[in-house]
Structures are given as C-alpha cells and as structure tokens.
Amino acid sequence: MGQVQATINGRSYRLDCSDGQEARLRELIDFLGRKVECLASNFGQVGDIRLLLMAALKTTDELFEVREQLFALEQRLAVSEQKLASSERQLAVSEQKLAASEQRLAASEQQLAVSEQQLVVCEQQRAVAERARDEAKEQARAAASREMTRGIIDNNVAVLKRSVSLLPL
C-alpha cells in the first residue's frame, strides 16, 4: 500500500492509497491545497476545517457545473446522433433513388441505341426505295421514249408506205 505526505494550509497529513496511485493522489492534494490557499487569502485563517469545507463546497460546485455541462453536451450529442441517423436514412433513400434513376437512364440509353439502329435501317430502306423509285422513273422514261420512238417509226413507215405506193412501178 502506498503513502503520500500532504501539506495543506501549513498542516501535514499522511494519506494511504493503492499502489501506483501516489502520483494521482499528489495531483489531487496539490489541487485542493491551491483551493485552500486561495480561500485563506480571500477570507483569512478561519480554521482548517472551515477552509477545507469551503474548498470542498467550491470544488463540489464546480463538479456540479461540469456535470450539468456534461449532461447538456450528452443531450446535444443525442440530438446530433438522431439527426445523423435521420440524415443517414435520407442518404440511403437518396442513394436508392439515384440507383433507380441510373437504371432508368441505362434503359433509356438502351432504347436510344435501339432507336438509332432502327433509324439507320429506315434510312437504308429509304435509300433503297429512292433508288427503286429512280429506277422505275428511268424505266418509265425509257418506256415512254421507246413508245414515242415506235410511234415515230410507225408514222415514218406509214409515210414511206404511202410514198412507195405513189411511186410509179
């Protein structure tokens, strides 16, 4: 068992403590000694018991203030933890909404790719149809030209036949 020699307000005290607690006990004694010295300088030597009682009351008052502050901090911490939990829940919901939006975007991008492929196919079909139309027009022009040429030839043949029939034989 450890022992510490303490002097408070000029009086010596021998205190026992657990082994290894000597430094902590000296720290507490120094703290209390400073309190008693401060009180003695303010109120004078009003007796060791009274000075120790006043120091104990002052220290107890400080302890109560610290406990009240600690309680207030614990309350603020609890509120902050609740807000944090709420924010985390909101974040989770937002992340789910984001994931759903990303899925919808991916689906839209796929639909766009399919639509673009369909557009390419439609453009190819349109080009084929335009070529077929142009070919049909060309064939129609050629047929009209042949008909016109046939008409001219038939007309010329008829003229020649009449001319030949008018020729003396």
Image (tube, grey):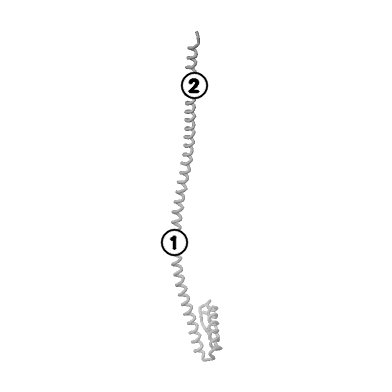
Q: Which mark is residue 90?
A: 1
Q: Nearer the viewer, residue 135 or 3?
A: 135
Q: Is mark 2 on a helix, strand or loop?
A: helix
Q: Quadrant of residue 82?
A: bottom left
Q: Nearer the viewer, residue 5 or 95?
A: 95
Whether 121 is drawn above or below 156: the answer is below
The residue sitting at 49% across, 89% down in the picture is: 50
Residue 10 percent location from the top left of the image: 56, 88
Amino acid type assigned to the residue bearing label 1 in the image: Gln
Spatial CA span between label 2 and label 1: 89 Å
Whether 30 is drawn above or below 115: the answer is below
In the rendered structure, the answer to whether residue 96 lies left or right of residue 42 reads left
Q: Which of 122 and 30 is in front in this view?
A: 122
Whether 57 is drawn above or below 134: the answer is below
Residue at the disc numbered 2: 152
The residue sitting at 47% across, 37% down in the picture is: 126
Residue 21 percent location from the top left of the image: 52, 77
Amino acid type assigned to the residue bearing label 2 in the image: Ile
Residue 31 percent location from the top left of the image: 54, 82
Residue 134 percent location from the top left of the image: 49, 32
